[in-house]
Image (cartoon, rainbow, N blue to C red):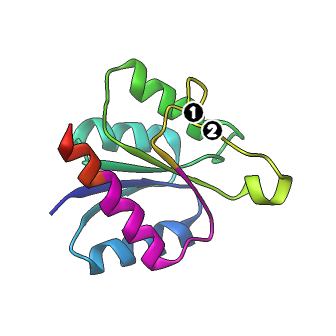
Amino acid sequence: MARIAVIDDDTDILDASSLILKSRGFEVVTANNPDDGYRIVKETQPDLIILDVIMNEPDDGFVLAQKFRKEGVATPILMYTSISRALGIEFSKGIMAPVDEFVEKPISPDELVSKVEKLLAKAKEK
């Protein structure tokens, strides 16, 4: 089964995401900050990265996604955000946010698994 890296500073989100994904047979590696997240992605080469927008700094997720893309990491990225709904900000994919999809936290278990499976299937097609 696919390996998924979840990078989020919220331990509740890390635990919940891991529990949901592991219950569906995925292997999960986690990190609670951008530096450890970078390290686990480089070391474990996951099939999918789930990345929070805000960690230590308000743009940590964007910076980390940009770093991965600049280094040629083509792994699909699903980005968690909790600020778009609260602030009315709409994010879009592109240079500033080189990710494959955004999801608003909290996310239901079924929606999380659906998004993960969709991105993994899309990556296999390439």
Q: Position of residue 71 (x, y in %)?
A: 35, 20
**Residues at discs 2 and 1 in contact (Cβ within 8 Å):** yes
| Local SS, label 1 | loop
Closest to the observer: 69 or 85?
85
Q: Position of residue 58 (x, y in %)?
A: 72, 41
Q: Position of residue 108 (x, y in %)?
A: 53, 77
Please report the residue visible at 56 percent of the width from the left and 23 percent of the height from the top.
95
- Label 2, on which residue? 92
Q: Quadrant of residue 115?
A: bottom left
Q: Quadrant of residue 112?
A: bottom left
Instruction: Tell which residue pokes out farthest to the left in this image.
Output: 1
> Which quarter of the rendered picture does the N terminus lie within?
bottom left
- Label 1, on which residue? 97
Q: Which amino acid, by three-letter code, is at mark 1?
A: Ala
Q: Earlier in the sequence, mark 2 or mark 1?
A: 2
Say if the magenta span includes residue 116.
yes
Residue 29 visible in the snapshot: no
